[in-house]
Image (cartoon, helix red, strand yellow):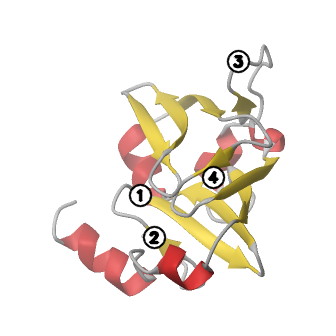
Amino acid sequence: MEVPGDRFYTKTHEWVKISENRAIIGITSYAIEQLGDITFLEVKPKGTLIKKGEVLGVVESSKTTEKIYAPVSGEIVEINRDCGVVEEGSSEVPIGLEKIVEDPYEEGWIVVLEVKGDLSSELRDLMSSEDYLKHLKEGH
């Protein structure tokens, strides 16, 4: 299972890659494997301020509907519409969701947050790739 070492992970299977004060966020290949075919992915609107642990969006699949949680606090500054991610309340038709399944760690990112607050404290509870792999082996 692919788990890149250049980002942090949550127990709820989101990943975050930090680039200066920006946090690129997506869902892990493990989450995608558990979800099955993704049919819809909706996130809070651009400009929304969100706190770590709050619901960032919802992903629907052929098997289930799951919430996506913010691994860090910040303002949504980008939404990956190229991968079919839509804003909450939008009438957009999701096109390109297969990119999230095919390349969840690069092309398949979901949103970018501008981090608001102390970055080191935001990252404190997150897991490294090694810790995330251990977490998965423990059956989570």
In the rendered image, the vertical position of residue 40 relative to residue 136, given as above or below = above
Which of the marked residues, 1 or 4, is nearer the chain's N terminus? Answer: 1
**In this rendering, the label closer to the viewer, 1 or 4:** 1
Quarter of the image where one finds residue 114: bottom right
Check disc 2 and give the amino acid type.
Tyr
Q: Which residue is mark 3?
A: 89
Label 3 or label 2, whichever comes before in sequence order: 2
Percent of width and height locating residue 98: 66, 40
The answer to whether marks 1 and 3 mark residues whose Cβ atoms lie closer than 8 Å is no
Q: Quadrant of the C terminus?
A: bottom left
Query: Callout 3: few (<14), some (14-19), or many (20+) C-alpha neighbours within 10 Å?
Result: few
- Distance of mark 4 from mark 2, alpha carbons? 19 Å
Of the residues shown, which amino acid type is indicated by label 1? His
Whether label 3 touches label 2, CB < 8 Å = no
Q: Secondary structure at mark 2?
A: strand
**Residue depth check, mark 3 versus mark 2: number of the one nearer the observer:** 3
Task: Tell me the residue that label 1 is attached to.
Answer: 13
Return the residue at label 4: 102
Q: In terms of sequence position, does the residue under pointer 4 or pointer 2 come before the other?
A: 2
Viewer-nearest of labels 4 and 3?
3
Picture coordinates of residue 21 (x, y %)? 76, 75
Mark 4: secondary structure = helix
| Amino acid type, label 4 | Glu
Q: Is residue 116 left or right of residue 66?
A: right
- How far from the left and from the top, in percent, is residue 43? 64, 36
Q: CA distance from mark 3 to mark 2?
A: 28 Å
* 133 vs 12, nearest the viewer: 12
Amino acid on which the number 3 mark rests in the picture: Gly
Q: Are marks 2 and 1 in contact (CB under 8 Å)?
A: yes
Rounded to the nearest angstrom, the CA distance separating label 1 from label 4 is: 16 Å
Label 2: which residue? 9
